[in-house]
Image (tube, rainbow, N blue to C red):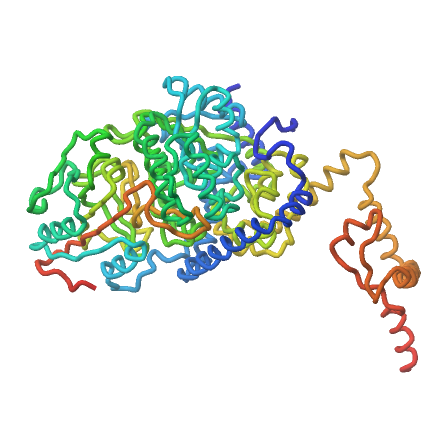
Amino acid sequence: MTAPTDRGVVWLGSPTFPDAARTALLDTQLRANLKRATTTIRAKRHAAATELDDWEALRDSAAAIKRRTARHLGRYLVQLEQTVTAAGGIVHWAGDAAEANRIVTDLIRETGETEVVKVKSMVTQEIGLNEHLLDAGITAYETDLAELIVQLGDDRPSHILVPAIHRNRTEIRDIFAAEMGRWGRPAPEDLTDDPAELAEAARQHLRHKFLTAKVAVSGANFAVADTGTLVVVESEGNGRMCLTLPETLITVMGVEKVVPTWSDLEVFLQLLPRSATGERMNPYTSTWTGITDGDGPSRFHLVLLDNGRTDTLADTVGREALACIRCSACLNVCPVFERTGGHAYGSVYPGPIGAVLTPQLAGIDRAATLPFASTLCGACYDACPVKIDIPALLAHLRAGVVESERARRRLPTAEAMTMTAAATVLGSPALFDAAQKAGSLGSRAIARDGRIGRLPGPLRGWSATRDTPALPAESFRSWWRKNRDSDR
Amino acid sequence: MTSRDAILRRIAAALADVPADESPDDVPVPRDYRRSHTSPGGDLVALFTERVRDYRATVTHAGRAGLAATLAAVLTTRGVRNLALPDGFPSGLIPPGDWQWHREPLDVPSLDALDGTLTLAAAGIAITGTLVLDAGPGQGRRALTLVPDYHLCVIRADQFAADVPDALARLDPSRPLTFISGPSATSDIELDRVEGVHGPRVLDVVIADPSDTPREQP
């Protein structure tokens, strides 16, 4: 396997997760914003999921459909290519981010346009499309409210579904007031932080763009192999605007988004809205098959993107992560995400699913700390509508990180040496006894009030954030030996 | 080698663990979920009414005879005057009164200048409170129910599917479909729902009973 080319996904120059998390935890405003938003959505998701008494059966079915799709991915992609082409669409294949960006740029240039409107799409974030287009002299306008907040604030997304989750209403007001005028219609002078007013300001700001745009770029939630139908699930109507009004529509999707049949959507259209926003159904779902005379775009391009997905597929354990439908339920229930926020992950895909997807898509050496960004509590697995066993994948990837480290270094790591020593000691009763006695004496020498605080040197990493109780004067084994003998 | 061939080759190599003679049907997909979450013999119209009101859409019931008058009453309440009327909208249903009806062809600026749109629907989904439009007769192109700020949708009581599986089975995926569950909304500010962004900010639904007498307004 060749080394990954530049696939995007991670932000270059980001600190590792532990360093970024330490900084994020000091930001009390960020923590308050995240706590408020995740608490709200958790309750809603739980109510929406438990309203269906066959929720577990739906999850089982969804996981199985994704398993079937992954095991026969090539066949379904070829079928999708045929059905989309038969319906008047044009299918392109892109091996990595650079190729996808090149294809999209060329397609836009063919239209002669220098502006495009965009439907919120994770995959175009992943490949860094907007930045690439800007270099090519094309301005991409994000139209999802949260993406707009991120774009206006020259910020990075911090959540899959609500990229501006780290911002509260007052911060959003300030961004709108300061920045809207630089991109187009300015915010009203008297804009307050009332969410309804903020939504109205976004409506006014983007309306002219929607009504005059000639080219739109979208992602896709699903693509149906047997009918050639693309599906976009959304709330605001910005998706409908982009999918309906322009003359040219360019949809970029990861190859894993294909589902075998139209009827398979009956599972996902029940699971996705309830898991994502906690609604029985999201306000708008659009489906389209190729082009339709007199209704919507007259040119439709579908770009099928690999960008690390076939590498992920090659790992028989790790491939389960490709089942993700980007609902964000795992982020919203994660105690780590709630405290650090999404930026700390340094990836377009944050949270628990990001911790398993990012190292696989970008290459494990580019995100080596992410598999450890979890307590393995399992809340993400319980919430996942397609039953991805994220804790098991994290453990699997942790092993991969250790292997990768070992392969790169000629000398063993301190951790590896410690583990080797521990194996020797734990394997010998005599050595274990001696170690306990030494540990008891040593730990009481450095303990204060029975607790060991911060330690220097290699032990600092563990001891900086936790106290350790001093070892007791007598071990259980020694006590047992004495008392059992005296009972006889 | 083209990117297409390279990707398909990488996929085949990645799936070396899948037996060559395995077919998709060999991967079991359990379908133990319900086809519908409604109770047997349940009142789909009443359920839809309750659910779509959760999204802050309004619902009015009308009998066949009083349908046009009901539409007139709803439009009067909203104070809209200039409305798009899709091709194939039944002339007998056009409400009597002082409204300006705008027919195709309508370009985007003309649509943007209108107050709203009056359409039929292709199907409804009771459990989720969803309307589905398939651009068929009386429903119009997708832009007609998108650009104007107000949408009044008429749906017959016999057009409701109980739940999502039943609805998808009735629909034709080769047509452009729009599933509408209330007015446009966003959860992007603090994950709290606010109605009214880019799509129509007001959605009114009139349910036409097959009988001449409307059911009691719940």
B157 relative position to A323: left or right: left
Relative to A302, does residue A223 appear above or below in the rendering? below
Q: Compared with residue A164, is residue B62 higher up or lower down, i.e. above or below?
A: below
Residue A164 x/y as whole percent: 49, 43
Q: Residue at x 62, y 56 (%)?
A: A377
Residue drawn where x is 22% and y is 34% of the image: B111
Q: Is residue B210 left or right of residue A311?
A: left
Frontmost residue, A446 versus A217: A446
Residue B160 shows in this picture? yes
Question: Horizontal and vertical percent for residue A245?
Answer: 30, 31
Q: Quadrant of residue A216?
A: top left
Towards the viewer: A248 or A17: A17
| Horizontal side of residue B143 vs A385, given as left or right | left
Q: Residue A411 appears at what percent x and percent y? A: 84, 37
Count all numbered tags in the image, as a single digit.
0
* In front of the other: A286 or A217: A217
| Residue depicted at x 40% and y 47% | A192
Which quadrant is home to the C terminus of chain B? bottom left
**Foreground pick, A13 / A32:** A32
Whole-percent x, y for residue A68 in the image? 48, 43
Q: Residue furthest bottom?
A: A487
| Res. A325 in view | no
Q: Quadrant of residue A228?
A: top left
* Residue at the front extreme, as displayed: A189
